[in-house]
Amino acid sequence: MPDNTKNSIISKIDEIIQSHSLSVDAQMSSVNDNEIILTHHTSGEQAMLACPMRLGAVIDVALSLEAQAIRQEKIKPINLGDYLFFEEQHLLTAISGDTEIRLTDKEVDIIRALKGAADSQMSREDLLEKVWGYKQELETHTLETHIYRLRQKIEKDPNAPKTLTTIKNGYRLVWS
């Protein structure tokens, strides 16, 4: 296959992948001119597609690579203070290995929201909207109650938190 045809195919595939905001790159196989390799940026997982192909098949494979990378990320534990956080299992395990703590759905949702936020911090209003779907004008102590309970589980001294800290009008999660 001529180089200009290869480049135009790869450009079109990259354009389609980017239009779906996926973290996948396309390249021609160095072994076979009739194969395109899709590679996920973070996981490094690859999939091979034979030419000719339907563009819908490219999207399906790219989406599959993205989903697989997300599943792998959720399976890996994350250091959270003195604990390893297993998101999918809703579980904290002490790094020393002597304690396991179950988390509620809302506690995991709070951790997820903070984990996904810039600098792992969010305002009170943004957390209420993200975790509970509450609008900003609502008067509630739901968030504070859940933060209190979560600190009881993850902090050595909940009265002097080091992992789940309070910032001006919000909260910050400190990853170790």
Image (cartoon, rainbow, N blue to C red):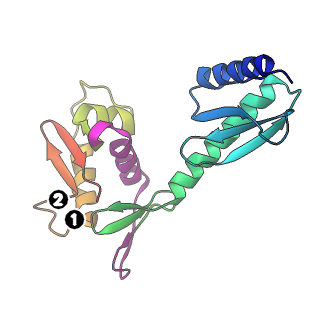
Residue 114 place in picture, x, y as percent: 32, 44
Report crowding for label 2: few under 14, some 14 to 19, many 20 or more residues within 10 A (C-alpha).
some
Q: Let me know if residue 101 is in the magenta part.
A: yes
Q: Amino acid at mark 2?
A: Lys
Residue under the image location 59 percent in, 23 percent down: 18
> Which residue position is annotated with label 1?
155
Residue 113 place in picture, x, y as percent: 37, 42
Q: Let me know if residue 26 is in the magenta part.
A: no
> Which residue position is annotated with label 2?
162
Residue 29 place in picture, x, y as percent: 77, 38
Callout 1 touching callout 2 (CB < 8 Å): yes
Q: Residue furthest front?
A: 3
Q: Amino acid at mark 1?
A: Glu
Q: Quadrant of the C terminus?
A: bottom left
Query: Which is more N-terminal, label 2 or label 1?
Result: 1
Quadrant in which residue 35 is drawn:
top right
